[in-house]
Image (cartoon, rainbow, N blue to C red):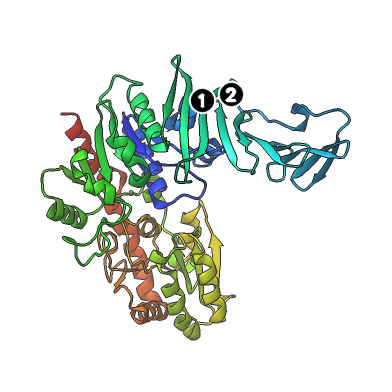
């Protein structure tokens, strides 16, 4: 079994989560047993899976594993299912219902958005203090009970399964230094209670138990090293461990040999000897990894993404049907993606082409969106630079646009570049490590630009908008270029790793 280790899975997915989903589908098509493994608690996890068209049994979550809730028949829980005194007064406002008895607030029932289905219930004592909160999984069973101390802080959390029993418990306490600590307990697991000092220790136990579900020699591919590596390194049962590098592994791409390591990979790479193999996204990254860490570790070059057969079989969108002068950037709104450079360059394009539009698609990290919106407002571009949010239908975005932008200061193997090329969208991207120069054919299916050179970015955008015939040719070439990353081509890369572990 191949396990893809991650922290969580949400509706708004980063490139890593989308890469895992795509990999799972590729393995399924080739009958390679695989599951995504997550460790974060989420009451809506199985809604997320359904939205992504992933079967429940394809994902193993730590809380599902211990609570026996991986496969659960759905039901709805409404106000009538709660124990409420007959004489209590119920007052609803929007998605909240206050329950009052003899002038005393007993509880507040919180409903899921625009429904009568219960999300959670907050209980109060006679003095109006919160004493408890109960939470329901979206599949219709109470999954979490939180108890509060006199100061209104969470003191204890109990996690339950559909059987109504407590299976996991988290205790909050202050150590001698006044810092909050967490102790986890797995309750009555195979007839025993077990205690763990923190989430990492619980994760390690979870990995070991999962590793013994079958009699196979399992391979653990770690996609989120910050959250998952400690538990993986400290397993007590034998498993093959693979580090998957999704992004640049160093902080300074100009000093591959001596640069500080990327924070996301520092612990993983400083424990180089713990791995059985490493996956890099491009030939250049593989070369750089070997230069720095040597040849002692098998290092495989496997693209993070691929273009599925259904996409390759689609008829190309005639260039004339694309929205003229529409540019898009599909990426998290974050400093490393440098949407601020795209906006600054677009200002020049808009002067030459008043009908030009720039759409920014993606969810925001921190307050980056506020900064970008202020930049747009200050440049008087509110009607022309549009913040579109996260979408699960990126192909529809790529099919509408004439040009895609990705002026990042750092990249891994960008799924955005590959997905855009597969939909015939010419791309302008900074020539940074790693990925853009592997995916884009410079001056054929797009243009590579120098990081930080906003004027060059603007000049390229202007040139392509002025030369619609050239842009149309780039679009045709983009369709052809994407075929290099077909399902079969990428699975051949995976097959090399599969063969290695089957020796």
Determine the image quadrant of residue 474. Answer: bottom left
For label 1, the SS is helix
Please rate how many residues cluster around mark 2, counting C-alpha atoms within 10 Å: few if below 14, some from 14 to 19, many from 20: some
Q: Is 35 placed above or below 402 here?
A: above
Left or right of 13? Residue 105 is right
Instruction: State left or right for residue 295 relative to residue 452.
Output: left
Q: Where residue 323 appears, x then y in whole percent?
A: 51, 69
Q: Looking at the rendering, which quadrant does residue 288 occupy?
A: bottom left
Distance of label 2 from label 1 (alpha carbons): 8 Å
**Which residue in the structure is indicated by mark 2?**
162
**Dot 2: element:** loop
Label annotation for residue 444: none
Is residue 213 shown to the viewer in this render?
yes
Can you name the residue that lies furthest to the top here?
191
| Residue 67 tag number | 1
The first of marks 2 and 1 along the sequence is 1
Q: Where is the C terminus found, in terms of image quarters?
A: top left
Observer-nearest of 377 and 252: 252
Q: Are marks 2 and 1 in contact (CB under 8 Å)?
A: yes
From the viewer's perspective, is residue 118 above or below residue 306? above
Q: Is residue 313 above or below residue 367?
A: above
Residue drawn at 37 percent across, 56 percent down: 422
Tell how many labels.
2
Where in the figure is residue 421, as x and y percent of width and height?
Answer: 36, 59
């Amino acid at each position: 079994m191949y396990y893809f280790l991650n922290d969580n899975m949400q509706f708004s997915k980063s490139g890593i989560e989308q890469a895992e989903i795509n990999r799972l589908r590729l393995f399924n098509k080739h009958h390679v047993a695989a599951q995504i493994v997550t460790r974060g608690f989420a009451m809506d996890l199985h809604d997320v899976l359904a939205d992504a068209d992933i079967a429940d049994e394809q994902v193993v979550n730590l809380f599902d594993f211990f609570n026996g809730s991986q496969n659960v028949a759905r039901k709805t829980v409404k106000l009538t299912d709660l124990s409420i005194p007959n004489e209590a007064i119920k007052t609803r406002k929007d998605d909240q219902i206050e329950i009052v008895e003899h002038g005393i607030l007993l509880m507040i029932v919180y409903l899921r958005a625009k429904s009568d289905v219960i999300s959670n219930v907050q209980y109060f004592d006679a003095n109006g203090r919160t004493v408890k909160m109960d939470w329901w999984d979206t599949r219709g069973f109470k999954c979490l009970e939180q108890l509060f101390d006199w100061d209104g802080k969470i003191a204890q959390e109990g996690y339950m399964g559909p059987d109504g029993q407590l299976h996991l418990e988290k205790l909050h306490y202050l150590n001698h230094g006044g810092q909050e600590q967490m102790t986890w307990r797995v309750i009555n697991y195979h007839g025993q209670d077990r205690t763990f000092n923190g989430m990492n220790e619980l994760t390690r136990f979870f990995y070991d138990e999962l590793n013994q579900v079958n009699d196979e020699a399992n391979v653990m591919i770690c996609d989120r090293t910050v959250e998952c590596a400690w538990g993986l390194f400290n397993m007590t049962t034998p498993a093959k461990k693979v580090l998957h590098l999704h992004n640049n592994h160093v902080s300074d791409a100009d000093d591959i040999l001596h640069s500080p390591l990327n924070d996301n990979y520092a612990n993983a790479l400083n424990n180089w000897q713990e791995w059985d193999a490493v996956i890099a996204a491009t030939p250049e990254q593989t070369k750089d990894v070997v230069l720095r860490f040597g040849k002692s570790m098998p290092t495989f070059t496997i693209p993070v993404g691929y273009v599925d057969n259904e996409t390759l079989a689609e008829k190309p969108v005639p260039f004339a049907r694309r929205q003229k002068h529409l540019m898009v950037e599909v990426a998290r709104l974050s400093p490393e993606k440098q949407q601020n450079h795209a906006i600054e360059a677009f200002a020049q394009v808009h002067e030459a082409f008043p009908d030009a539009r720039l759409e920014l698609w993606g969810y925001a990290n921190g307050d980056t969106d506020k900064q970008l919106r202020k930049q747009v407002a200050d440049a008087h571009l509110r009607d022309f630079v549009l913040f579109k949010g996260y979408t699960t239908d990126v192909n529809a975005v790529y099919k509408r646009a004439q040009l895609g932008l990705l002026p990042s200061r750092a990249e891994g193997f960008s799924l955005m570049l590959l997905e855009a090329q597969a939909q015939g969208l010419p791309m302008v991207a900074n020539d940074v490590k790693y990925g853009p120069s592997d995916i884009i054919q410079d001056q054929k299916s797009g243009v590579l630009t120098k990081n930080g050179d906003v004027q060059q970015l603007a000049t390229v955008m202007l040139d392509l908008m002025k030369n619609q015939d050239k842009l149309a040719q780039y679009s045709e070439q983009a369709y052809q270029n994407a075929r290099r990353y077909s399902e079969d081509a990428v699975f051949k890369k995976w097959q090399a790793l599969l063969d290695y572990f089957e020796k």
